Structures are given as structure tokens and as C-alpha cells.
Image: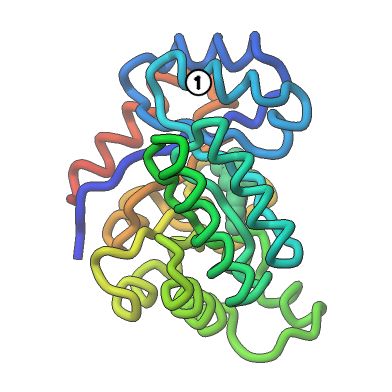
Amino acid sequence: MSRSADIIVALDVTSIADVKRLVEELGDSVNTYKVGMELFYSAGPEAVHMVRSAGKNVFLDLKLHDIPNTVAQGAKALTSLGADFISIHATGGSNMMRETARIVGTAAASQGLTRPKLLAITVLTSIGQTEWQELRFPGDIGDQVVHLAKLAQQAGIDGVVASPQEAGNIRRACGDNFLIVTPGVRPAGSAINDQSRIATPSGAVKAGANYLVIGRPITASANPRAATEAIRQEMEACS
Ligand SMILES: O=c1ccn([C@@H]2O[C@H](COP(=O)(O)O)[C@@H](O)[C@H]2O)c(=O)[nH]1
């Protein structure tokens, strides 16, 4: 089923100046930005403050992966920064996901903040079947992604990060209220880069994604605003 979906632009840059330039240039064509490892490790919390001060939502994609107490306390600290979405790895296990959901809920309530949505990373979209087998993981990637999505949902996590190729099966398994966030989106004819399990923007929307994370097809484009608007048109045409 097609639904209205939104774009999250991945700010994979290293400086606040680059963030400012992109956010200004993209203006009202983008509501939500993703701050990942590259930007957060380079520029720190100021990157989050910068995006929020522009009136935009922030997906803090630091992909926390550690024992339950460490991830829960890390996510609590990110909650205080004012993130709207926070990612943790589903393969940290059910106890880790459940404890993080509990601590983040308590932390947000005690600070009068809206509880950030927690997103579980399933299998990175750069991993294809060959690399999957090299890692000696058995079975099919798609089956594993759906399994991890169900575990995340049972642990009280709000949604998953997965490839658009798996979005349809996740939607069927986890229902309409579960968030599906898909990187690995490539408009027809654009460079695939290091991604593996990809689909077009319209493919991701038709499969049931709520948010499409898009970095280089926008940020490396000669005209990021025009690239965003073209992607939006493609998404709207099929929703
Ligand atoms: O499985 C995953 C999880 C996160 N990502 C992140 O999304 C963007 C994608 O950027 P592109 O330039 O559009 O490839 C990037 O920040 C990744 O860290 C992902 O690609 N796959």
C-alpha cells in the first residue's frame, strides 16, 4: 500500500558551515535531517543544535550497539540533546532494546521533552548476499530483517531502519503503526556508491516506507534543491 512518506536528508559532512549551507539551500523542501557519525564526531552536539535552530527535525543516527545499560544511558544523553529520532542496533538484543525504550521514556518525561522515536537498525543496506555469506550468517537477509523488526517491535521500539527491498514484508509483519525508515534509495540513473540493497524513491514509497533517508543523491548533486524536488515529485506521483 502506498502512503505519504517524507525525505530525511543525510548530512554526511564534517563542518557546521557545510550544514548551514545545505540547510539554507534546501529550505522548506526538507523537514528532517540526519546527523550521523561523520558529522557528530567532527562537529559534536552543535550540529544538532544548528539543525534544530533552523526549525528542522533531527534523526541522530549514531547506531548505538553495546550492552543494555551502556546503550540506554547513551540514548538518554542523546534524548537531552533534543533528537527526534535515535538509532540503536537491533542485534544488541531484546534486553538492550527494551531497557533503552524504558530509560529514554523516563528521561524524556522527566525533562518535559517529547520522547524521541527509537529506530532499530536491522541489516545495513550496504550488505549484499555475498557479504552476508562471507560473514557466515545463515539464510536470507530479507528474512533476518523481518525477524529483527518483529523483535524490535516486541521490545517497544518505534520502528526500524531497513532497505526498501524489505519494507513491504516488514509492513505486513509489523502493521501500519510501525515506522519504516529506508536508506539505500537511489533515483534511476544515479550512482549506487557503497549501497547494495537499493530501490528508487517510488519503489520505497510503494513498499510502505514512512521515511526515505537520502544522502549523496541530494548532497553531492550540483543542485541539491532541484534534486530534492525531483525526488519529492516522484514520491508524490505514487502515493
Ligand atoms: O542500513 C543503513 C543504515 C544507515 N544508513 C545511512 O543512510 C545514509 C545513506 O546515505 P546515501 O548517501 O544516500 O547512501 C548514510 O548516512 C548512512 O550512514 C545506510 O545507508 N544504511
Query: Which x, y percent locates residue 39?
Result: 69, 29
Callout count? 1
Answer above or below: position of 153 versus 234: below
Q: Quadrant of residue 8?
A: top left
Q: Which residue occupies 61% across, 75% down?
A: 95
Q: Is residue 5 left or right of residue 48?
A: left
Q: Quadrant of residue 236?
A: top left
Depth order, front residue of 92/206: 92
| Camera sees residue 187 | no
Residue of label 1:
51
The residue at label 1 has a CB less than 8 Å from ligand 1: no
Toward the bottom, the furthest residue is 139
Toward the front, the furthest residue is 110
Q: Which residue occupies 31% across, 51% down?
A: 202
Q: Is residue 38 left or right of residue 195?
A: right
Tag 1 secondary structure: helix
Q: Amino acid at mark 1?
A: Val
Q: Which residue occupies 45% across, 53% down?
A: 105
Q: What sort of colour scheme is used for the picture?
A: rainbow
Q: Which residue occupies 70% across, 31% down?
A: 40
Query: Which x, y percent locates residue 214?
Result: 49, 40
CA neighbours of label 1 inside 10 A, class few (<14), some (14 to 19), many (20+): many
| Camera sees residue 63 | yes
Q: Is residue 76 left or right of residue 38?
A: left
Depth order, front residue of 134/101: 101
- The image quadrant where one finds the N terminus is bottom left
Query: Which x, y percent locates residue 154?
Result: 43, 78
Answer above or below: position of 165 versus 30: below
